[in-house]
Image (cartoon, grey):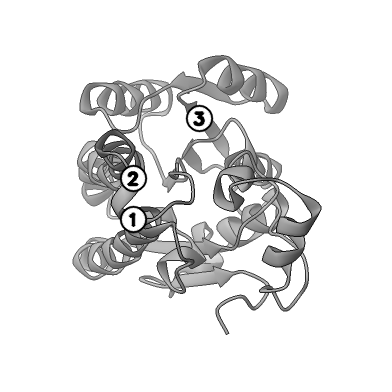
Amino acid sequence: MRLNGKTAIVTGGAQGFGAGIVRKFVAEGARVMVADINGDGARALAEDVGGIACAVDVGRAASVDAMAAAALAAWGHVDILVNNAGVTHLPKPLETVTEDEFDRVLDVNVKSVYLTARALVPQMKARGAGAILNVASTAGLSPRPNLNWYNASKGWMITATKTMAVELAPRGVRVNAICPVAGETPLLKSFMGEDTPEMRAKFLSTIPLGRFSTPEDMGNAACFLCSDEASMITGVAMEVDGGRCI
C-alpha cells in the first residue's frame, strides 16, 4: 500500500498505459480520478476500480480547470498528478504533417502540461507537498524518423519535467517523467503506420529485451516515482524501454 491515503488524477486514464497506472495506484491504496476525453471509458474504469471519473479535453483550459475543481471538491487536495494523455500523428515526412495534426499533438502533449500545472500546482505549493509525473517517451530521447513533431513534443515534455522540478523542489513538489517504448496500447498502430507482423518485428528488433512496454510496466514505474519511496528523486526521465535508448 505504497500510495495509501493519496489522491491522484491520471489523464488519459481510460485505456492503455493510463489504465495500467490507474489500476496500480488503486491497488496501492490511492483514490484515483480517471480523466479522459472518452468519458464513457473513464466512467467504466472508475466503476471497475472504485474511483471517480471525469471527461476532460486536456488541451482546453476550461475543461482542465473543471477537472481540477471536481477533484478538489471530492477530496480537498490532490497529491499526485499524472500527465499521461498523449496523441501522435501518423508516420510521414515532417513537411507533410498538416497544421491541424501539428496543433493537436502540441495541444495534447505540450499545452496540457502547462494547463494542469496552472490548475493544480498552487494547491500543492500551499500544502508543501505533491508529485507530478509526465509520461514522455523514448521518442524524446532517441527519435524515430517520420514521427518528427511527436518526437519534438516528447522532448519538450522531458525538458519541462526538469525545469518544473528545479523550480518546485523548494516548495516540496517533485516532478519526474517516465519514457516508455512503444507498447500494446491504442497508439501502437499509429506509431508503426500499419500493424503487421513484419512491422512489429522491425520495432521489436530495436528493443534489447525483445518485447513491447505494457500498461503494467508503466504502472509499476509510476507507482514508485509517485510514492514516498522516491522522496529524493526529482527531475528524472526514467527510461522504461527494455534497453531501447542504450
Q: Tell me which amino acid carries mark 1.
A: Leu
Q: Which mark is residue 94?
A: 1
Q: Which mark is residue 33?
A: 3
Can residue 129 be seen?
no
Tag 1's secondary structure? helix
Number of other residues with Cα within 10 Å of mark 3, as a class: few under 14, some 14 to 19, many 20 or more: many
**Which of the pair 85/227 is nearer the observer?**
85
Q: Provide residue 147's location: percent of width, then percent of height.
A: 43, 56
Q: Residue at x 23, y 45 (%)?
A: 114
Tell which tag, 3 or 2, sits nearer the viewer: 2
**Which of the pair 48/152 is nearer the observer?**
152
Extreme residue toward the top, this view = 40
Q: Is residue 157 left or right of residue 240?
A: left
Q: Provide residue 181's location: percent of width, then percent of height.
A: 59, 63
Number of other residues with Cα within 10 Å of mark 2, as a class: few under 14, some 14 to 19, many 20 or more: some
Q: Which residue is mark 2?
A: 97
Tag 2's secondary structure? loop
Q: Is residue 116 left or right of residue 2?
A: left
Number of other residues with Cα within 10 Å of mark 1, as a class: few under 14, some 14 to 19, many 20 or more: few
Q: Tell me which amino acid carries mark 2.
A: Val
**Which of the pair 120/245 is nearer the observer?**
245
Q: Is residue 125 left or right of residue 208?
A: left
Q: Provide residue 24's location: percent of width, then percent of height.
A: 67, 46
Q: Do residues under tags 1 and 2 come within 8 Å of each other at their CB atoms?
A: yes
Q: Residue at x 24, y 36 (%)?
A: 119
Q: Is residue 213 left or right of residue 83?
A: right
